[in-house]
Each structure stands twice: as structure tokens, then as C-alpha cells.
Image (spheres, rainbow, N blue to C red):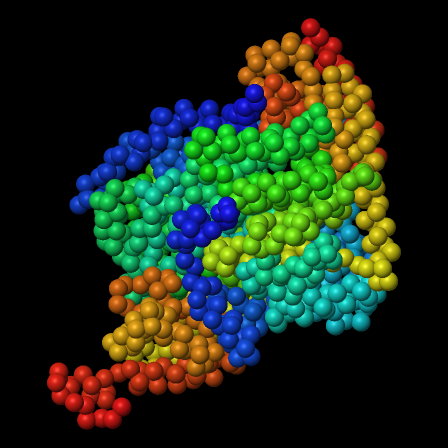
Amino acid sequence: MRRFVSGVLSSYQKRSLSHRSLGFFSSTTSLPNSDSPSSSSSAAMPTPVTLETINPKVLECEYAVRGEIVTLAQRLQQELQEKPGSLPFDEILYCNIGNPQSLGQQPITFFREVIALCDHPPILDKSETQGLFSADAIERAWQILDQIPGRATGAYSHSQGIKGLRDTIAAGIEARDGFPSNPNDIFLTDGASPAVHMMMQLLIRTKKDGILCPIPQYPLYSASIVLHGGTLVPYYLDEATGWGLEVSELQKQLEDAKSKGITVRALVVINPGNPTGQVLSEDNQRDIVEFCKKEGLVLLADEVYQENVYVPDKKFHSFKKISRSMGYGEEDISVVSFQSVSKGYYGECGKRGGYMEVTGFGADVREQIYKVASVNLCSNITGQILASLVMSPPKVGDESYESYFMEKDGILSSLARRAKTLEDALNSLEGVTCNKAEGAMYLFPRIHLPEKAIKAAEAAKTAPDAFYARRLLNATGIVVVPGSGFGQVPGTWHFRCTILPQEDKIPAVVSRLTEFHKGFMEEFRD
Amino acid sequence: MSHKGLDYETLNENVKKVQYAVRGELYLRASELQKEGKKIIFTNVGNPHALGQKPLTFPRQVVALCQAPFLLDDPNVGLVFPADAIARAKHYLSLTTGGLGAYSDSRGLPGIRKEVAEFIERRDGYPSDPELIFLTDGASKGVMQILNTIIRGEKDGILVPVPQYPLYSAAISLFGGSLVPYYLEETANWGLDVNNLHSSVAEARSKGITVRAMVIINPGNPTGQCLSEANLKEILNFCNQENLVLLGDEVYQQNIYQDERPFISARKVLLDMGPPISKELQLVSFHTVSKGYWGECGQRGGYFEMTNIPPQTVDEIYKVASISLSPNVPGQIFLGVMVNPPKPGDISYLQFMRESKGILESLRRRAQIMTDGFNSCRNVVCNFTEGAMYSFPQIRLPPKAIEAAKKLGKVADVFYCLKLLEATGISTVPGSGFGQKEGVFHLRTTILPAEEDMPAIMESFKKFNDEFMEQYEDHRGYSRIREGETSRVSC
């Protein structure tokens, strides 16, 4: 029987537990006499913000994507800068994070043209500008500026985002899905991550509230569930069937949680998957929708990789579309869909643009969502504009269409090639099996580590996959994230590697990785 | 039929408790009226560009170039952008790995954090460590991060000024903590009396609350007062004695409209005081690109600087920041230019100075116009706006008005503000959204409407107010009618 081992919550939790038992209560018990200010013996009381006295949920949460391995990588990078040639490689290759433009991917020219014009509208009045920007970018900038009161891109907007931009996004969703989308259902956020946090905040009341999450999962989910005081209810994707999602597994985990007194509130599905890369079949999606409807769960559909599909036999279908095509409307099922400008072929991570489309909730709940959004006033305007461009890019016939299409196609086909090359390379390594990356930006190979290596890891007080990842980094400069950062079936080991290094770097990545792995397996041969 | 996933009843209670009046009832009503075609003057939020303030030219040029780096290679770029903007754009791009589209370090680009540290050193005269400066998507996110780190449960209290900017009360509700109010003295120019602090803390402790931190907003929001150096010293000593973290919201540090109390940062005063306090007192200071003379609210750029926070705690804060990956990069660049504006001799210097001075001087004039305007109204008393962007007049509502409000199920100042909105289109925020003493009513408006519109706005307000007071005061003699007597005035 599979159990979710605390692979995702291990080291910090252990550390914090010991801290908590020491200091958690001591700072709160000594209350001074109310007539006089407390004595100046500040040495007696712990200072207010120390590890002992901070919010324990902060201590407990983990986020491996930028965890220990990355800190080590940064140190090595500094070493390289200070003492070139001192390490067995001459550059650090960050394959830990889906950050395409940091590894050389170019932004989509049309999008950047429009944004630059919106950032500095006065140049639209200059004739010289025509020579620097394409005509349709200028036109789109005018269109967008006209949707912004006073053309003030520096003003806080409506807390859900600029109405005209939401109209554009809704139209884009409708064009994509064939079903209407209401601009009032859209909440523009600083990236998809804050939107996920908002939903967790709304859904989680106490530790007895559970959220069903895939294992392996993108650790934003585990971290935000911990931060908001809830319980992660794992459901395992099946590695043997290409990371398949079985509804029977969902059902089992739901029953299991219920029997432990957990009220399961929502189901997270990441499609295409992260770190696993699988694209769900339509049948599968229908089963999931049926399951959520039956069990009264909110479906949280993370669809940020919707434009990253690399196999001809699979297509992205939004969960909203699937629900509507099954005849289910607002009354039948609650679906929250997340999209971002960080992925796809646009890769605009640094802009922090994204949105959630919230359907199937009553007006009173939507008021609350609005209220929480309003405390932060609004998301950044550039990100909002970008989200509208992503959902409504140049069309056939537009001046920029050809160059836009070439850039997009170039990036996507390159990603597909890199996914295949790296997948093949990994599968050729001894003891390594790697499922195909049907979509997203990652490979998640399984490494069958020899007993000797596992023992060595134990001796070094590290998880075996972290041990492997460290060795890999030290030997090759390649940064990956240990599988324990995402969750995995206990006793199995993986790592997540992005497919993002530029194509000309891939051969080097493959050869360095292959050489390292051979050496590692030799060293730890039983 | 199974229950729906997210019914109102099953929402997180903390979310339901949250109030944020700045975009609450009044704003929603104003938006409705606007849709119906009524002209609305939105003075509910400190949002300068929405009321006609123009963005500063230089930073926009720099960021536009950073967004479209291919422009830098174009031989004609110099026809549209000045050379110093081009150079600055190249400089900021060089601080990134991959330009504006890549996630930066979760704490913000190291190069920009260094520039912020240098700014702080120039401002205060003490070195600042870039490793202790975290950039955030606006100061609000930083405040939320820090409060989330401090608050463990409802027994943790945060000292917050009353009146306060309701981000604090909202965040405390959201994180399940307790707000411990300390009242500012309206009759003493919204001054902060340390005795009030002591009694607030004592009362909280008697209820079993552990007071963990104290918030000061300097210059104040909504109240505008600028703290004196002596006041800051008292506050620092108080926090030190009571073992509180001081959270210094200093987002309005550039908005100062009097010369008696210029802005001094809490950190400078702390370091001036020397050891031991300068090495022990825990302080987090917040700043932003949204206010000052920049008003770049929509960019969401801000930072917090930590002083005397233990390294392991800093690590934990970093960890939580990393879950959100990174603050938006264009906002970071705005911050860079803000702390490092054009210098004398730079091509853009004169224009930058002209634009900045123009805005600041106008704000100073508008602060005065509004204060005087309110003070000329019946039953309205208004402290001078020493700093920040708001006016917070006290409206002395007659008992009948309060009655009428009650009958409609509304808080008295909400009632007044709704009537003001409907009569004049001026959208304000009722004082109850910020907290005030029991039975004392206020409203908050901004000093941001264009200077040329100000006289008409104040006139419109005065007309409404004086008529309102006319309507609800006892001048018709109703109060002199004893029980049983009939009125001699027809209704």
C-alpha cells in the first residue's frame, strides 16, 4: 500500500520540531506586570523574531525548486567567477527551474513592442516611432491604452485587472474552447502563483481541510497548503503508465482522507503535468470532472503549460471546456483555471503575469474573492497587458503575424526536439528510465540507485536523490532538483531536469551527464 | 445532491473577517454610478496617475528600452530616446540574466538591491547590507510576508495605529492574529503619545495576548503626520523594552509638506542611538515606487530592509519569497531608477528635476488648499496634511444624522459619504474604514485631484456639507419640543 512519505516535508520539519519544543511556548508565558514596562532584561526573553518564535507554518513549508541545491550552485558559480578553471566545468547550467529566458530563449518581438509602447506612450506621437516599431504593434498599443482610464499605465487598476484586457482574455478563452467566458470571472494576478495562494486561503479553514494533489507535484501546492494551515491529500500518478491519473486512485485517497477526519475541499490537476509532463486524454479529463462533481470538490486546474504540447497524438483541452462539453454549467461544478505568461512559447517569467478564471461559485463567494484581491489593490499592469497579448496574439493577415509565427514555431519545435533528445539520452543511462515529456518543460527520470549509493547517502545524511543531484552538480555544473522536492512513491528516486538549455548546449549537457552517470554507477557498483 | 465545493458557509473564516474599505462599499457604489454615466472623482485611493499626474519621463524611457532591447541595436533609437536613458537601460539589462523576462533572484536582482543599499546609505549616513534588502511586488506584499512570518495564532498581537491604513487590519485578520490598537491624538495633530502605547499593550496582555510587533506609518496614512526625531526615539525605546519588532511603513517619505519635521528614517534614529539598542532592536522598513512624486502604483515595485533580524529568520523569509519565485522585474528597475535618479550634468537631469519639483510643490499646495477648504465647512475640523497624500477631516455629525444612518443600517460616516458621493460624485473612504475613536467620524480623501480642479471640488463639497448639516441639525427646534407637545412646524 502506498503511503505518502514526508519526502516533501522532511528536513525543515525535523529541524523545526526540535526548535519548537524548545522555544515555542517560552516567549509567550512571561507576562510583565501591567503597571510598569517590562524590565530591561531583554536577555531573559528571546528576541521577538527568531526561529523559535516565527510562524511555525513558515518553518514547515518547503520549496525545493529554489532550495539547497540552488544555494550550492550559486556558491559554485561565485567560485568560478573568482577562480576560473578551479572546477571541472566552466559554467553552471541551471536546469532546476522553468525560466526559459534566463537560458537564452528570446522573447516574442511583437509582445515586447506593444509593452514598450505602453510603458512610454508619449513616443506614439513621434513620427520616428513608426520606423522603430511595427504598425500593428503601434495599433495594438493604442487599443490597449484606450482601454485604460486616462491611458495611465502607472495607476492601480480595478482589482480584478483592467476590464478591457479581461474582455480580450475572455474572448481568447472562448476562441480556444468554443464556450463563452465571462470577463467578470477573471482575476489577473502577479503570475499564476498568487492566484493559487488566494484559492488555498479561501478553501482552507483548519488542518482538517484537505486538498488532493498529484504526486509528483509542483511544490507550490504543498508549500501553499502548509502555509495556509491545511493538509495535503496525495494521489499518486502511475509512472508505469506514462504518469497516468486513475480516478480509482482519487477515490481511494479521498476515502482514506475522510476516514481520518479530513474534509477534502478541492482537487489539483496540473495539465500538462509538472514535473511529469503528461498531457491528459479527454476521457481521463471527463472522468476527473465527473469525480469532482460527484464529490463536490472544487477543481483547481493548473493549465500554465497549455501551449507546451510536443506530441502529435495529444492535445490540450481546458477543464472548463471539458466540463461545458459534458453539459455541466455554473450550477454543476466549480472550476478554477490558472494560466500564466511565464511558460508556453513566450516564457515571460520576470513579468509576473497570469490569471485565474473562476466559475461555478455563488455571488457571495465571488465577493469574498474580490475582497481578498482588493487588499493588494491590483496586479502589475505590464503583466496584465502581457496576459491579454498571450490570449490574443497576432492573427493571420496581421503585419507581425509571419515573424510572430516563426518565432513561436521556432521555440516550440526546438522545445520538442530538446525534450526528445534529453529523454533518449536519459533512457540510455544505466538504471535510468524516463517517461516521455508530452508537454510542459521538464523531464523526470527515475534513477535506480545501487544499494551502495543509498548507504553513502544515508551516511551523508541526505536523501539518495539529493545525494545524486549534489554529486552531479559538483562534477558537471548541471543543477537539477531532487525528486523528493516533488514527492514520489517511497523508495523510488527521481530528479527533475528542464529541457530549457539552448539547443547548442544540449550535446554538452548530454555528454557531461552521461560521463558523470557512468562514473557514479561505477563508483557505487554493488 | 452533493454540496458545492465552495459555499459561503464553508469559506475560511479569516477571509470573511477581512475588511478593506479603500475598495469597499463606497468604491463599489461609485463604480456603479460611474457605469450609469455619472462623473465620479475617485479620491478613495492614493493613485496619482489615475487623477492626471503624469509619469516621470526618464524612468519610462529606461523601462521601455529594457522591455524591447532590440531597439538598442537600432541606429535610429537616438531619435526617440535620450542617450542617458539608453545607457541606463543597458546598465539594468546587464544586471539581469536574460533580460526582463527571466525570474530574478527571489529577493530581487542583486545589482538593484545594491543600488537600494547605496541609496539608504546616502540618505541615512549608515551603510546598508543588500543581503538584508528584499524587493517585492509593491510594499503591500512585503508587509504581508513579514506579518505572516510573525503571526502564529490569535494570541499574537500587532500594535497598529488608529487610524491606520487598513492593509494592516486586513492582513492581521487574514493571518489569524489580533490587532492591538493604539490611538493617535487628533487634538495634538495626530501625535503619538507613548503613554497610549503602554496602556494598549497592558490591556492586550491582560487579555492573554502576546504583543509581537508595532507598526508605525511615517508619514501617516490616513493622518499625514510626520513623526519627530524625539518621537521616533521614544518609540524605539518602547519597542526595545517591550521586545517588539518595529515595522516602519515609510512609503510616503518623499511626501513632506512642512519644514518643521523633515523625514527621518527609523533606522537612522536607531543607529544614531548607538549600542546596545542599535544592535538589538529588530526593525523592518518598507518603501515603494507607488507614492512620493513617482506615483507608479501600477508597476508594483517596493522593498523591505531588515535590521537586526537573525540570519536564520532571514533565511526563512527568503524561503517563503522563493515560493513566489521573484518580484516582477520591470518594477525592480523602476525602484533602481527611483533610488538612483538622474544627476546634475545628465542629459535628462533638468527635465527630471522640473517634473519632480512640479509634482511635489503642487502636492504641497493642494495639501493646504484641502485643509483650508475643509476647515471652512460647517462642523468640519481638519488637521493639516503634514505628509503623505490624504486629508482626514473630522465630520461632526449631528445626532439626527446618526439616527438616520442607523435607520438605514449604516455606520454614520458611511451614510454621510454615500450622500456626498450621490450629490457630488466625490468618492471618499469613510473614517470607519481606518478606525477612529468611538462616536468621532471622519472621511479620507486624497489631495491628488488636479490643482485646477481643486477649488471646484472643495466648493462642491462645502455646498453638500453645509446643506447636509442644515438638514440634520436641530435648528428647526425639534429638540425643544417636549414629549406630548405637537410640532408647530408643518412637516
Q: Residue most toward the front?
A: B1
Position of A296 relative to A134 (above/below): above
**Does A455 sit left or right of B317 as displayed?**
right
* Near-viewer residue (A363 or B55): A363
Q: Position of residue A494 (x, y in %)?
A: 66, 24
Q: Residue at x 50, y 29 (%)?
A: A256
The spot of residue B320 in percent (x, y) is 52, 39
Count of numbered labels shown in the rendering: 0
Q: Reply above or below: B55 against A202.
A: below
A43 relative to B212, above or below: above
Which residue is at the front of the view, B320 or A120? B320
Task: Please provide percent x and percent y for residue A48.
Answer: 36, 38
The quadrant of the rendering that contains the C terminus of chain B is: bottom left
Q: Is residue B449 left or right of residue A290?
A: left
Q: Residue at x 41, y 24 (%)?
A: A18
Residue B385, position as x, y percentages in the image: 39, 69
Q: Is residue A379 left or right of residue B390?
A: right
Q: Is residue A175 left or right of residue A44?
A: right
Can you see residue A412? yes
Residue depicted at 40% across the width and 34% down the height: A50
Residue B282 visible in the snapshot: no
Q: Nearer the viewer, residue B229 or B489?
A: B489
Residue at horizontal 68 percent and vertical 68 percent from the top: A145
